Image (cartoon, rainbow, N blue to C red):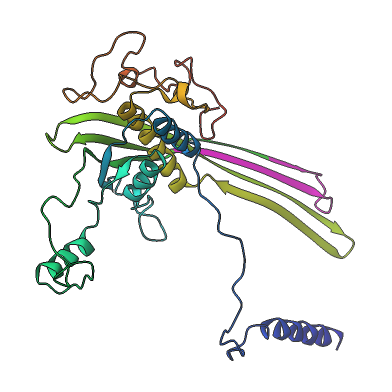
Amino acid sequence: MTKLKTLLAAAVTCFSVAACATSNSGSDGLYATPTGGAPVTPNPPPYSDALVCMAAHARTQGQAAPRIAVGRIADYTGQIAPEGGTRVTQGAALMAMSAFAKSGARLVERFDTSVAELELRYTNNQLIEDASEDQGFRQIYAGSIPGSDYYLVGGITELNANIRSNGQDAFAGDSVDSDPSALFSRRMYVMNVGLDLRLIDSRTLEVVDVVSYQKQIIGRELSAGVFAFFGDAVVDVSAGGRSLEPVQLAVRSVIERAVLEISAQLYGVTPEQTCAFDDPIGGSNITGGVQPYTTYAQSEAPYVQARTSVDRGHERRDADIRSQLRGTYR
């Protein structure tokens, strides 16, 4: 009878918990209140401040901002997530637009012109009203759309899982089964994402700059537990946590670092001298501005073409690299 009462009490408890969810909507028309209430916050990667600083420096020096169009920056990794969908964001081009906007560039739309083309077709058929025009409808004027000076295209070309992984397991307990025992486990692994971008002169279609960068991403897992008998009672307690650096935020960080490098070329300045920021890549490849005749324009020492050096960004061979920026090798 005691066991039956215990089972009935447990069943009543389960039904009372389940009663919190109901099939009848409330007076506000909702079945349930959504969990969470975190506020909307900015989403700045580590290089956003440097991009904004670059824009402020260009305005202070009176430098003209180039007109930039961003084309397709596709995912060429071809990797599919186990739960479905791609593992890498398909919005890399949108991230590049946001990065160029922070750098002070004047953006012209070339990525999605469907609305503009529809408006142009309606205007050509005199279907759009415009009170400012004498005829009462919108007019089409030659040369009213500004062209781009350069456009950016490229793709996400690398997503390498489990570049390195390691773990530790520890178990402690007595030879007597009833004595307490404990378990500790730790895991860590590293992956990376890389992209290749190119800047093209819109008038000549010459590739005037190329950037190829990668960023490492770290994941950690930690767990611990205790198992013991206390008389007729059994106690099994465990706790743990898992964290993974966001892959899509890593993509945004790589894009912003590439746009910072390209913007420095367009403005003809070095970001390290213009804006203070901690960067493991070291000094930028400054050539005094984008040269329209060759992708890697020749420059005088000490501004060598550092991007072509295999030592650049290498954790063991590059003297400029530092470990403060997240995701670097430790």
Q: Is residue 312 above or below residue 253?
A: above
Residue 145 % position (x, y): 18, 51
Q: Overall secondary structure of the magenta stretch?
A: strand
Residue 93 % position (x, y): 31, 48
Residue 84 % position (x, y): 38, 61
Give the residue furthest to the right: 231
Residue positioned 71% across, 81% down in the render: 17
Give the residue furthest to the front: 134
Residue positioned 21% across, 70% down in the render: 130
| Depth order, front residue of 77/259 | 259
Quadrant in the rendering for residue 305: top left
| Depth order, front residue of 117/295 | 117
| Depth order, front residue of 164/319 | 319
Q: Is residue 269 above or below residue 170?
A: above
Q: Quadrant of the C terminus?
A: top right
Q: Is residue 322 above or below residue 229?
A: above
Q: Quadrant of the N terminus?
A: bottom right
Residue positioned 51% across, 35% down in the render: 327
Q: Is residue 186 magenta?
A: yes
Give the residue furthest to the top: 301
| Depth order, front residue of 124/326 | 124
Quadrant in the rendering for residue 231: bottom right
Compared across the picture, whether 67 is left or right of 136 comes to right
Residue 113 % position (x, y): 21, 58
Quadrant in the rendering for residue 209: top left
Q: Is residue 39 magenta?
A: no
Does residue 132 appear anywhere in the picture? Answer: yes
Per the rendered image, the range of residues in magenta is 170-191
Does residue 193 appear anywhere in the picture? Answer: no
Compared across the picture, whether 205 is left or right of 271 comes to left
